[in-house]
Image (cartoon, helix red, strand yellow):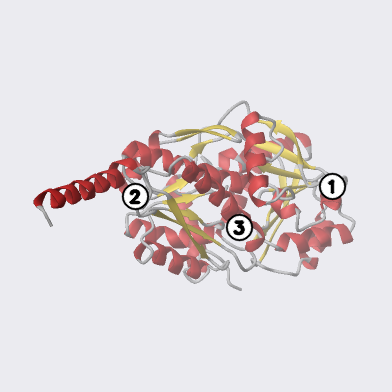
Amino acid sequence: MSKNTLLIIFLVVLGAAGWLFYGLPRGIGAEPIKVGILHSLTGTMSISEKSVVDATLLAIEEINAKGGILGRKLEAIVSDGKSDSPTFAREAERLITQEKVTVVFGCWTSASRKTVRPIFEKYKHLLFYPLQYEGLEQSTNIIYTGAAPNQQIIPAVKWAFDNLGKKFFLVASDYVFPHAANEIIKAQVVALGGHVVGEEYLLLGSKEAKGIVRQIKAARPDVILNTLNGDTNIVFFAELRIAGITPDRIPTVSFSIGEKELRSMNPKTMAGDYTAWNYFQSVDSSDNHGFVRRFKEKFGADKVLNDPMEAAYIGVHLWAQAARDAGSTDPIAVRKAVLDQSFNAPEGIVHVDPETHHLWKTVRIGKIKPDGQFDIVWTSDGPIRPTPFPPYRSKTEWEIFLQDLYQRWGQSWANSG
């Protein structure tokens, strides 16, 4: 072979290599960025959490359709927490140490979040948590995209006091969120001049609600404030109706029932009850209409959206914006960059509060309609600054309260029964 032939072959190979490096679109052939999704796909909480996974995947798909992050596509690693806090902990550590994900989007119950929090702090990793919750927590390793107490619980109790009645019965699941929420509610009711006429708890996953409904009937409250979670709500509301307790007699204000949960219930018998959230599918805005349309196109025209789904969707986009600004998907770099982020969400503009790692959010009260959607009957004037620690006690007193619960349940964040 002549020298000229060798030279030509060399130049052709060199040109091909250059075209592969510079000519192909960025991201093609690049290793994807792994992101973790950790929710309950089985167990009592799957009624709520499966749909949050779908909303998270929609956001990931949207980001990939625009080229991904830093020229690389996102790859979702979905893990089942099985409605069990120890499983959540094991899966969180596996996602971080074995799957090498760059971020985790997940958890629903506060028991699961509190169980995984030390893992994210140990590995200096990052969790985006999409649920309204009891507050009383701040972590530099968690971005809270759901509501703090002053963005859901506290305004809802004030609205109920002004519009529904002064006597309240508190029904709740027996884990950290409802216990803490009820301490906040009781302090607020006393401050307003109202009365708590009953407070009862059911184990997570309980299928027995006759006894608690008998107590409600005997106490004759004006309003039921409901912090039950999971499929226990199905049993509870069925027993209410059997006992003749309907929304026109004793309305219920729920804090963990949305459009998705109503699909597993009977919306016609629920019509007239209320829930408090930051987002409803019925929010009338062009951004929300587009969000609803895209979700239905991907997952089916019969699907519905709710607040935790929207909060999960927000979290993915906030993380993506922060990664682009940081020029890195390293959790520490993203954690710093995300504190400057805002997002034009389906619920309206949200932005990260750098002091608390929570979002500024608008509050809404919805009245259930027979079709399982909501009439929005009250909306705050604008996004409310998050206050994770309500002023009814000092931060230290709240932390002592939480530790007492933890010790009472045998160093767990839920009563196992």
* Local secondary structure at mark 3: helix
- Tell me which label, 2 or 1, sits earlier in the chain: 1
- Tell me which label, 1 or 3, sits earlier in the chain: 3
Which residue matches tag 2? 331
Image quadrant in which you'd find residue 339: top left
Local crowd size for mark 3, using a 10 Å CA cut-off: few (<14), some (14–19), many (≥20):
many
Q: Residue at x 58, y 72 (%)?
A: 416
- Where is residue 182? Give x, y as percent: 62, 51
Image quadrant holding the C terminus, namely: bottom right
Q: Which residue ends up furthest to the front in the rendered image?
A: 2
Q: Which mark is residue 348?
A: none
* Local secondary structure at mark 1: loop
- Tell me which label, 3 or 2, sits earlier in the chain: 3
Tag 2: residue type? Answer: Pro
- Tell me how far mark 3 sits from mark 2, CA to CA: 24 Å
Local crowd size for mark 1, using a 10 Å CA cut-off: few (<14), some (14–19), many (≥20):
many
Image quadrant in which you'd find residue 189: top right
Front residue of 11/281: it is: 11
Q: Nearer the viewer, mark 1 or mark 3?
A: 3
- Tell me how far mark 2 sits from mark 1, CA to CA: 47 Å
Tag 3: residue type? Answer: Glu
Which residue matches tag 3? 49
Which residue matches tag 1? 247
Front residue of 284/177: it is: 284
- Where is residue 217? Give x, y as percent: 84, 57
- Where is residue 106? Give x, y as percent: 50, 55
Give the vertical position of 247 relative to 113 (above or below). Answer: above
The count of marks equals: 3
Q: Residue at x 63, y 68 (%)?
A: 43
Q: Nearer the viewer, mark 2 or mark 1?
A: 2
